[in-house]
Image: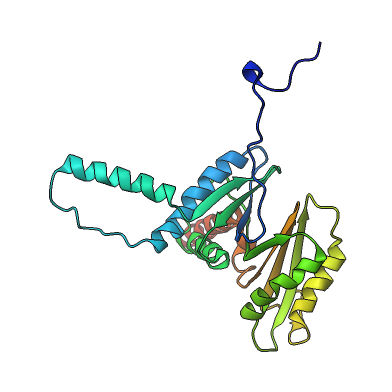
Amino acid sequence: MKRSKSGDNGKKRHKNWSVLEPGWQGIFVTCPRGKESNCRAELLDLLREYVDNDDEEEDEGEEESGDIEAVLSKEVASLKQKRKESNVEGHLVGCECVVFARLKKADPVEVVKRICRDAKHKGMKQTRYVQRMTPVSLLVTANLDNIEKFTPIVESAMPGEGLKFAIRPTIRNNTKIPRDELISNTAKLVGHRHKVDLKGYDKLVLVECFKSVMGLSVVDEFDELNKFNLTQIYEAAAKAQNDAQNDAE
């Protein structure tokens, strides 16, 4: 007799991952295999420092006086409320080595660049599981016809003419969209106003196709910030620090 797969006490085992929705914006993040839950928790803590702290004005100093116990109690309640109202959601996505953070208000591109800049300039390692971050300014249902929905994003990030650009597609868990067609259809959004340059680009168009959705963003500083890979940024910062110490000796 075969054992039931329903789990303990005959209860059905529910999936613990999310289906990403068209209309969302956020960040795809890679992590070590088997550490997706750890990465999700770490990512939420990291993003809340940048997103929630920016979105809310802290009323510091208001509770300088008064009963300490009451003040602490109020602070704990406030923290719980902020977490409940957070502008960040972390999602497991049913794929090894990948998680997704939904940003309800903040610009994913700017958030990713700020995190990477801080990591590079401060050189202090803050994360263990978060690796490469890929911002997406909009998610749409994954089919080639929907690429035109990214037009406002491209036009806003690449106004005028004369810029050099490249396209970097990533396709995961999707066999219906050919890579070449994804690139060519994305290039049509840019048109002839700008010139393709795979190495010396001013702007990089990131296209992330994942399962039933795809997202796009237009970024700069990609190579300068180690392709938005925090692990590589920390390693480079540590190496630079060691080299500086060796030169000083």
Q: Say whether residue 125 is visible.
A: no
Q: Residue furthest top?
A: 1
Q: Is residue 125 above or below residue 139?
A: above
Q: Residue at x 25, y 58 (%)?
A: 60
Q: Residue at x 48, y 56 (%)?
A: 87
Q: Residue 187, percent across and down? A: 79, 75
| Residue nearest the observer in this picture, 143 or 163 | 143
Q: Residue 122, percent across and down? A: 45, 60
Q: Say whether residue 116 is visible.
A: yes
Q: Residue 232, percent across and down? A: 61, 56
| Residue nearest the observer in this picture, 189 or 164 | 189
Q: Residue furthest left?
A: 66
Q: Which quadrant would residue 154 be assigned to in this image?
A: bottom right
For the image shown, how many numbered marks are present on the structure? 0
Q: Residue 178, percent across and down? A: 87, 61
Q: Left of 174 or right of it: where is 66?
A: left
Q: Is residue 7 above or below residue 196?
A: above
Q: Is residue 142 above or below residue 222?
A: above
Q: Which quadrant would residue 94 be assigned to in this image?
A: top right
Quadrant containing the N terminus in the rendered view: top right
Q: Is residue 125 above or below residue 208?
A: above
Q: Residue at x 54, y 66 (%)?
A: 107
Q: Left of 152 or right of it: where is 48?
A: left
Q: Residue furthest front?
A: 11
Q: Looking at the image, what colour scheme do you see? A: rainbow
Q: Residue at x 52, y 63 (%)?
A: 111
